[in-house]
Image (cartoon, rainbow, N blue to C red):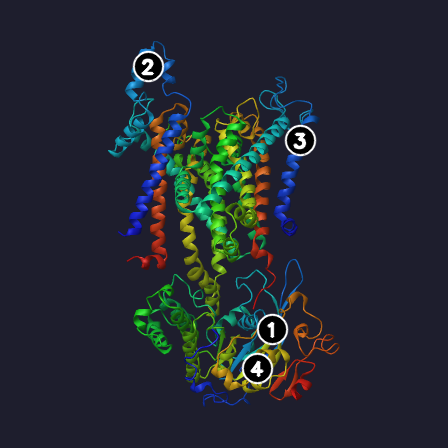
Amino acid sequence: MTKSPTGHTAFPGAVPGAAPEAVPGPASAPLLSVRKLAVTFTQSSGPDIPAVEGASFDVRPGETIALVGESSSGKSVTAMALMGLLSSGSGSGAGPVITGQALFRTSDENTVDLLSLPEPALRAIRGRDISMVFQDPMTSLNPVLTIGEQISEVLMTHDGLSRRQTRAPVISLLTRVGLRNPEDLISRYPFQLSGGMRQRVMIAIALACRPHLLIADEPTTALDVTVQARILTLLRQLQAETGMAIIFITHNIGVVAQIADRVVVMYSGQIVESAPVRDALDTPLMPYSRVLFRTVPTYEAVLARRRHLPTIPGHVPDPRHRPQGCTFHPRCTHFVHGPCDTFRLSPEHATPDHEVRCARWREIARD
Amino acid sequence: MNTVRRLLKIRTASAGLVLVALLALACVLVPPLLPRGPLQIDLHHRFLPPLSGIHPLGTDEIGRDILARLLAGARTSLLIGLSAMALSTVTGCITGGLTGFYGGWTRIILMRLVDAVLCFPTIFLLLTLASFGQPGAATIIGIVSLVAWMEVSRVVDGQIRALRDREFIVAVEAMGASATHMLLREFLPNIAGAIVVVSTLNVARAILMEAYVSYLGNGIQPPQPSLGNMLNDAQEYLRPDPWLAILPGIVIAIAVIGLNFIGDGLRTALDPRQSNASGSRR
Amino acid sequence: MTDAFVSRLARMAVTLAIVSVTGFLLLHLAPGDPLAQFALSPGMTATQLGAMRHQMGLDAALPLQYLRWLGALLTGDWGRSFRDHQPVLTIILGHLGATLELAGTAALLAIWTGAAAGLYGAFRQGSRADHLITVASIILLSIPTFWFGLVFISLFSVRLGWLPSGNIHTVGAPFSPADYLKHLILPATVLALASAATWSRYTRNAVADVLGQDFIRTARAKGLSPRKIRSRHVLRNALLPMITLAGLQFPTLLSGALVTETVFTWPGIGRLFLDSLEYRDYPVAMGILMFSAVLATAGSIVTDALYTVADPRLRQARP
């Protein structure tokens, strides 16, 4: 997966800032505003596991946020927490402890806190105002239900349609996500479809109720390269049509450059840097982001060559025993004794738009 | 060891260990302290209820001490269980190892045979087998192992076949290790856990099978006490003395529940998914 | 019918062949003589016994006996009992009804209670009720069926006098459904206990397995209610492993029936098998073995067919 000669030029909407005109500018009120989100998994035996610590970020209407980080950096947990999918959902079976606030503007213009909303109210938002596309389209669809049944049940749940009434919208959804012969597809089962087709079905399910926010959790990771490119194009195109915002979770830097307006970098459960895509890729301030983007110095170079995160010596720290001070310091080339390993750091504004969590970002910026 | 610590943390498993340990200790330590042996008849004191005089659990239809008989029966049951387990584990490991390792026709024939045998209702098979040879402990050990080895064999076969494709095994094989070396050094440590689980559950199963066979009259023969044949006797005396039926059942239950709890706990403790449950989430 | 079906039939034939050879060898090689019962009757001479032996075909070589038996079986002749010379098939069919009624009732009881308990536990994983059901299931599976029989008899029949302790109906009384049901309750419950425990454990694991799948998360992300998710997504998928168990339970139920029939003097196949072993009545014993093997393999074929109906992956894979 190191290089792919195909597909990367066909992204008319890929230039950051060139968001669809229907969408208000960055100054408009955020659609989703996450403040100090923390997720802690408690175990009956053993220490608590803080999966996410103090994450704050905004998502504006129509904007695409890329949530970047290594495995177990907390990016999926963040998404699942926003969707309220971390608890078992069946009453008992305690989920993790979630604190913080996530204010979201629903389609009926109410502002609600997703983290404190009771489950039935949250259920009305899930699949309607906020949808989610998952990583593995092979396992994310129910093997014993037809494609038609799986799409129509969203419409039946949220729009109160009857089974018969959903046929037309389902077919139009399948067409919109670029699937041919939709009349035939609705009676097919997932195992009869390729991975790319299944992911398109997943996207159709997510888009069924015209959500304002789509959370895509590594939606292309499980697909092969050419299919990845097509799915990305599709998402861009659908975003242009609907004006929805996207939180795109990925560890593929090439994808970040293609699709994101803003980049949020997570490391070991914390947001370590957050900036517009061009700043993030061209002048990253946090050493971790610098390593991430180092081998790909410019935005254009990234666009030209899709890459995975480079490997960094050392390991992501065990969440139960995170280092003192900056959690990245054991692996950091800019480490100095004192400022880096004494206190937990808070994010600082390098520019009004660029936040960074690093004790030495000023010196790094001067380099 | 890590596994032991995890096992002890499972409440049912430690309860099982305690139950089985207590029963085994009682079988060894208590009989010498009892005034009457398990075969001593006393027609003047028949059908005594529990807690009467020198008979802590009462007497049976011909005045034998029930506690003495229960402990003798439990000892026989435990011995049968352990021996049958040992025999079936060894047989199962050898056959399963061979079929899993070499595959081919041996495997097809063996698995067909296992399928066919599983077609017989277990009790039918046990009873038919029991008509061979003198009824007694040795025969029961033999027939129970004859039925039980297949499960071990299946597990070993399945585990080895699953392991064969794993990288480290492929690497060892590529380095030219001999088959014996592979089986003993590479496979055995990796499947030991699964074998321990099946074997523990097999001890429990063997004790149950003994009870069934003896209850149906084809196992341990009177006057030798066995938990199964005591229940057979008891059926005739349900009216005067239900204790005769209740007590042997409780002893069987203690042994088998204990072993099943241990086996179940081992399965959980040895499950690799348990050991890294510490939040390997993205 | 497809290749898969044909190969399945072929495998069934191989299994049945192995069952018949092993069964035949075991029964005939076991010590004991079917003529022992006649040898004791007064006025029986050695010559007469020899003649009988010849007439029964017991003096032939074992392989020849087997081939004769097999040949007859393939033409539909199951042989005649050594004891009373009745046709084996008649005898078996005469006892089969009682066993099927008992085992069928028990199976229904077991599936309903077991699956309900398993579902309850799986939907409340880690709760007190879940632990309780798990522990109760292990306990039920750890106690021999017949002990429950004895305890129930001593409680409900001897002590309380509510229910009869044995037989299929009151001796001498005319048949009445109420009387029959009264006789059925205890044995069916006893036989159902262990099976219910198996069902509960199995259902719990199957459902817990499905609940952990990605598509359940998808269903939740769609905003479906827990109820909808259970009925549409969980149950449909958990049904597949449960169908498998239904097939596997068959031999187990027969084993249990044999013991339960002994405890409750229920005139079924199990008792018949015990008696035929006792008297070395080979034709009847072989007949029962073959009958149960055929039922078991047929059961697994029906299971497969149901599986195909329930799982679209298999349904559509057929050409």
Q: Which mark identifies residue B28? A: 3
Give the letter of the chain under mark 1.
A
Q: Are marks 2 and 1 on the same chain?
A: no
Mark 2 and mark 1: span between their CA atoms? 91 Å
Label 4's element?
A: strand
Give the letter of the chain under mark 2.
C
Type of amino acid at the residue the image marks with label 2: Leu
Q: Nearer the viewer, mark 3 or mark 4?
A: 3
What residue sits right under mark 1 in the picture? A312
Q: Is residue B92 something one can see in this rendering?
A: yes
Coordinates of residue C210 in the picture (x, y in percent):
47, 58
Q: Nearer the viewer, residue B262 or A251?
A: A251
Coordinates of residue A145 in the picture (x, y in percent):
38, 63
> Mark 3: few, some, or many residues within 10 Å (few <14, many ≥20)?
few
Give the letter of the chain under mark 3.
B
- Above or below residue A236? Residue B17 is above
Q: Are marks 3 and 4 on the same chain?
A: no
Mark 3 and mark 4: span between their CA atoms? 72 Å
Give the letter of the chain under mark 4.
A
Query: Residue reaching furthest front?
Result: B176
Label 2's element?
A: helix
Type of amino acid at the residue the image marks with label 4: Asp
- Above or below residue A53? Residue C105 is above
Mark 3 and mark 2: span between their CA atoms? 52 Å
Q: Are marks 3 and 2 in contact (CB under 8 Å)?
A: no
Q: Are marks 1 and 4 on the same chain?
A: yes
Q: Residue A153 occupies which quadrant of the picture?
A: bottom left
Mark 4 and mark 2: span between their CA atoms? 100 Å
Q: Nearer the viewer, mark 1 or mark 4?
A: 1
Q: Nearer the viewer, mark 2 or mark 1?
A: 1
Q: Which mark identifies residue C49? A: 2
